[in-house]
Image (tube, rainbow, N blue to C red):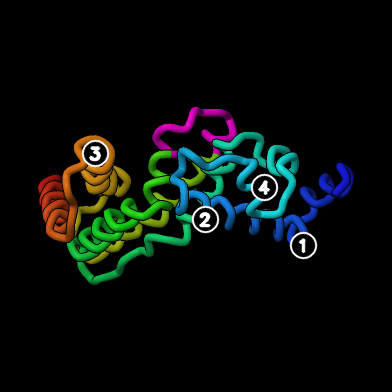
Amino acid sequence: MTAAEDTTTQRRPGGRAAKVTEAVHAAVLAAVAELGVDKVGIPDISRRAGVRDSSIYRRWGTRENLVLDVMLTASERTLPLPDTGTLHGDLRAFATGLIAYLDTPLGNGLARALAFVTDSDEIVAARNTFWEKRNAHNEVMITRAVARGELPPGTDARLALETLVAPIHFRHFLTRQPMDESFAAELATRVVRALRAQG
């Protein structure tokens, strides 16, 4: 591929650019599953995807940008929003799903990348966009509970979800204590009680 062809590929939506992106994303996910996020390298991704490493550098700039972009994109397809009919049920199901997700190579790799990858303008933008999308998606659990009368109007949805997920990330990264469905249920109970107490 010539430089001119590569530039055209980058600018044209779909077509070859989409195939290259798909191949690179698949290669990164396979490498993360096989090696762990810390050992993913662009030369290996280039080989797996059948794409020149110069094209990867031109598109993503750094290994960190590449890994974070792939993981953020992949994570948007996981952790479906539960709809059990109750706030406690939704929070318990969401917490259980998050615990299981963090125990996968993708989930653990994404969490480590978000926490430890050195910031650049591109990473800050990618992280902010990711969390804005995830928060907007997940806050539906809280707004539904308000509409059902389970929570008072004006409940801070984002803070409510942060209260739920913070202990999970704390255990995952710091204490390495075990987490299971009973732990998720207990977290959901505590968050619901705290939110109702504000009413």
How far across and down, in percent of the image, does residue 61 sit?
Answer: 66, 35
Labels 4 and 3: the sequence-earlier one: 4
Q: Which residue is mark 4?
A: 46
Q: Are marks 2 and 1 in contact (CB under 8 Å)?
A: no
Q: Are marks 3 and 2 in contact (CB under 8 Å)?
A: no
Mark nearest the camera among 3 and 2 is 2
Q: Which residue is mark 2?
A: 30
Task: Identify which amino acid the numbered label 3 is placed on.
Answer: Phe
Q: Residue at x 30, y 55 (%)?
A: 98
Q: Are marks 3 and 1 in contact (CB under 8 Å)?
A: no
Q: Which residue is mark 1?
A: 15
Q: Residue at x 28, y 48 (%)?
A: 161
Task: Identify which amino acid the numbered label 2 is placed on.
Answer: Ala
Q: Residue at x 35, y 59 (%)?
A: 140
How far across and down, in percent of the image, does residue 37 sit?
Answer: 46, 43
Which of the 4 image quadrants contains residue 18? bottom right
Q: In whole angstroms, how far apart are the C-alphas of marks 3 and 2?
A: 27 Å
